[in-house]
Image: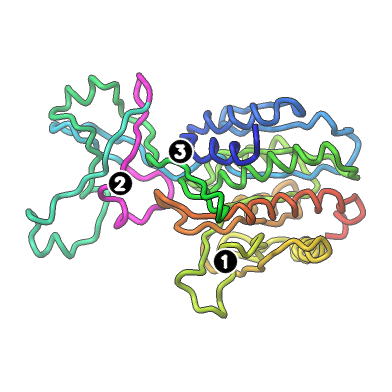
Amino acid sequence: MEFLQLVEKLSNARGVSGFEDEVLEIAREYAGDFANFKEDSMRNLYIFPKYNRGNRPLVMLEAHGDEVGFMVQAVKPDGTLKFVGVGSWNEKALPSSRVQIKTANGYIPGVISAMPPHFMSEAQRSAAVTYDSLSIDVGATSAAEALSLGIKVGAPVVPLTEFCYDGQRTLLSGKAFDDRLGVAAVLECLRLLQDQKTDVDVIGVVSSQEEVGMRGIKAVMENVRPDAAICFEGCPADDTFTPEYLVQDRLRGGVMIRHMDSSVICTPRFVAFAGQTAAEENIKVQMAVRTGGGNNGAYVVSANGGTPVIVAGVPVRYIHTFNCYAAMEDVEANVALGVALCKKLNGKTIKGF
């Protein structure tokens, strides 16, 4: 499987928080020739490269496999579905979006529906869009018909969006770039490290349920005790709405290395080391200080008595929507930085963090 094909498969995979199985199948397929695997009940996947020696400092390369989505809460008498969000959405952008709902017989299409403006009062026109004012329409006319399609309470729902690649501009578009682009970077780093001389062992982790409160990583850090960690993320690009002087996550700007956000202050000495390594290897990076957001690094940094961590991000426009943009060169920059860091890290350096 080529790297672009990996990215496409990961983007198209259906894996709302708690239901990451399709993502893990793709990871197993890509890394099967050079790694062994372990999976826990939370759908965290642990990838153990066969080239590890077992007696060296351990560096964890991590990305979360889940995507934001929805879940069926109830079937209404008219055959439409009451649903809730799984992860953070801008509800205003949801009406008329196409989704796919898991049923007993496979996934079926649906549309997020709202009352047509023709029937709205002035108060309804100006009211906030909430999940109570939306439903999912699968074309049924009764609850019995909807249930006959195999729809059940608790069914996961994800965007119905097809991945596209513009080869001339190396532009990616699709869903779930947070964090399937990070997963792709982890898998490619592990593959490329087969042929590199390092002073560390590595473990890849595709973690679960990040979008609902960084839950999977808590189990991961109970099962893995890495000496240092790199969390690969899909990060919200800010270059289309932010003053020029404040843009810190630009499309085609390279790796976004995060100093802090509302959940974490990444290990400062490790951040500096990553920046220096990028400069030496001519890898494009952009440093960011965020006042919102959050990621698995927040738990990693304080787990097991303190674990040095950096967050390496791919700039993604329109994150947590049905249609994202990203540049392949930014994904490749993340891979290059991950490989370069694993080649430079050693026990002494890590202890100095």
Q: Residue at x 32, y 43 (%)?
A: 84
Query: Does residue 100 appear anywhere in the picture?
Result: yes
Q: Residue at x 54, y 35 (%)?
A: 9
- Secondary structure under tag 3 reads loop
Question: Is 72 left, or right, of 24 in this rendering?
Answer: left
Q: Quadrant of residue 49?
A: top right
In front: 15, or 167? 167
In what quadrant of the picture does the N terminus appear?
A: top right
Which badge, 3 or 1, is on the more N-terminal residue? 3
Q: Residue furthest front?
A: 168
Q: Quadrant of residue 244?
A: bottom right
Vertical placement of residue 90 versus 43, above or below: below
Which badge, 2 or 3, is on the more N-terminal residue? 3
Amino acid identity at mark 2:
Ser
Q: Are marks 3 and 1 in contact (CB under 8 Å)?
A: no
Real-space CA distance between mark 3 and mark 1, rounded to the nearest whole angstrom: 27 Å
Q: Which residues are magenta?
A: 84-106
Query: Does residue 306 appear anywhere in the picture?
Result: no
Q: Is residue 126 magenta?
A: no
Structural crowding at the residue carrying mark 3, measured as other residues with C-alpha within 10 Å and reported as few (<14), some (14–19) or many (≥20): many
Q: Name the residue that disc number 3 marks.
A: 16
Q: Name the residue that disc number 2 marks.
A: 97
Question: Is 295 left, or right, of 317 in this rendering?
Answer: right
Structural crowding at the residue carrying mark 2, measured as other residues with C-alpha within 10 Å and reported as few (<14), some (14–19) or many (≥20): some
Which badge, 2 or 1, is on the more N-terminal residue? 2
Amino acid identity at mark 3:
Val
- Secondary structure under tag 2 reads loop
Q: Are marks 2 and 1 in contact (CB under 8 Å)?
A: no
